[in-house]
């Protein structure tokens, strides 16, 4: 059997528009997060150009796009930040709102939310206060 575009499933990454769509989502997402007084403090000393690049690469992988991410693992990158479950949930809400605003299909958003649930323990390291 020959593999053709008709037999190869299209990835979520391709469905939403590839790199340009991921970049747009990351920009809008961080605009929302940095405007949120509960979350902005986590990014006070962060190089946001690099942060945006890292998230775009990670989001591409989550959506089935190219795996070009070579940064630290989620646990290593977030452990020292003492992120609470409540703040993690708010970040997830901002990401979901971003994807909805950009017209991403519901099944893609649902899959991203599943991944958010799967990696929660790698990011959350503090109890809710």
Image: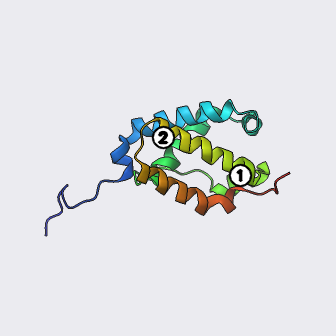
Disc 1: CA contacts within 10 A as few (<14), some (14-19) or many (>=20) = some
**Residue drawn 69% across the image and 50% down it:** 88
Residue carrying label 2: 100
Specify the quadrant of the image occupied by residue 55: top right
**Residue drawn 59% across the image and 50% down it:** 71
Secondary structure state at the residue bearing disc 1 = helix
Name the spot of residue 87 as percent of width and height, x first.
73, 47
**Residue drawn 50% across the image and 48% down it:** 59
Question: 48 or 95, which is in the foreground?
Answer: 95
**Vertical comparison of 81 with 6: above or below:** above
- Indicate left or right for 41 with 70 as reference: right
**Vertical comparison of 29 with 118: above or below:** above
Q: Which circle marks residue 78 in the picture?
A: 1
Point out the image quarter for the N terminus: bottom left
Name the spot of residue 68 as percent of width and height, x first.
46, 50
**Vertical comparison of 26 with 107: above or below:** above
Specify the quadrant of the image occupied by residue 79: bottom right
Name the spot of residue 117 as percent of width and height, x first.
60, 60
Disc 2: CA contacts within 10 A as few (<14), some (14-19) or many (>=20) = few
Say whether marks 1 and 2 touch (CB < 8 Å): no
- Indicate left or right for 14 with 55 as reference: left
Specify the quadrant of the image occupied by residue 17: top left
């Amino acid at each position: 059997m020959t593999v053709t575009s008709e037999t190869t499933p299209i990835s979520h990454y391709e469905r939403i528009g590839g790199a340009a769509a991921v970049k747009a989502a990351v920009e809008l997402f961080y605009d929302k997060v940095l405007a949120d007084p509960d979350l902005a403090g986590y990014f006070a000393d962060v190089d946001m150009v690099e942060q945006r690049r890292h998230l775009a690469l990670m989001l591409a992988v989550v959506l089935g796009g190219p795996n070009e991410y070579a940064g630290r693992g989620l646990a290593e990158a977030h452990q020292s930040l003492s992120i609470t479950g409540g703040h993690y949930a708010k970040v997830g809400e901002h990401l979901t709102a971003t994807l909805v605003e950009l017209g991403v299909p519901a099944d893609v958003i649902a899959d991203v939310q599943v991944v958010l649930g799967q990696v929660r323990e790698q990011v959350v390291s503090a109890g809710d206060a």
